[in-house]
């Protein structure tokens, strides 16, 4: 179940969801390049050898992978 979050003015807290890797253009980032996105306000969804996880979790585990999309 997905529940969307809104601020006090009933505006969605998600501004943009953008596809990064595409069939003709795969984008990979190493463990050192995956630390933060949008100064910590955004999240990257990363496909790794340990599954599909968020960029902060990938950084904590010390692994990189293919960046699927960004959410901010």
Image (spheres, rainbow, N blue to C red):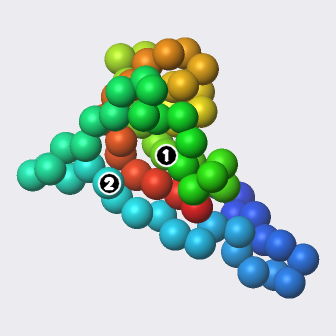
Cβ atoms at labels 2 and 1 below 8 Å apart: yes
Question: In the image shown, does 2 or 57 lie closer to the viewer?
Answer: 57
Can residue 51 be seen here? The reply is no
Label 2 and label 1: CA atoms lie apart by 9 Å
Out of 64 and 71, give the one closest to the viewer.
Answer: 64
* Mark number displayed over residue 33: none
The residue located at (60%, 20%) in the rendering is 60
Tell me the residue that label 2 is attached to.
Answer: 20
Quarter in which the C terminus is drawn: bottom right
Q: Quadrant of residue 5?
A: bottom right
Q: Residue at x 28, y 36 (%)?
A: 28
Image position of 23 (left or right of 2): left
Image: 16 above or below 20: below
| Secondary structure at numbered mark 1 | strand
* For residue 45, above or below residue 39: above
- Residue at the image position 54 percent from the left and 25 percent from the top: 59
Q: Is residue 6 at least partly visible in the picture?
A: yes
Would you call the spot at circle 1 few (<14 residues within 10 Å), some (14-19), or many (20 or more)? many
Q: Does label 2 or label 1 sit earlier along the sequence?
A: 2
Whether residue 22 sits left or right of residue 6 in the image: it is left
């Amino acid at each position: 179940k997905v529940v969307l979050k809104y601020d006090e003015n009933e505006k969605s807290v998600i501004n943009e969801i953008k596809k990064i890797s595409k069939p003709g253009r795969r984008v990979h980032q190493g463990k050192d390049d995956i630390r933060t996105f949008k100064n910590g306000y955004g999240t990257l969804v990363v496909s790794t050898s340990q599954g599909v996880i968020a960029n902060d979790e990938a950084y904590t585990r010390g692994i990189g992978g293919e960046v699927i999309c960004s959410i901010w």
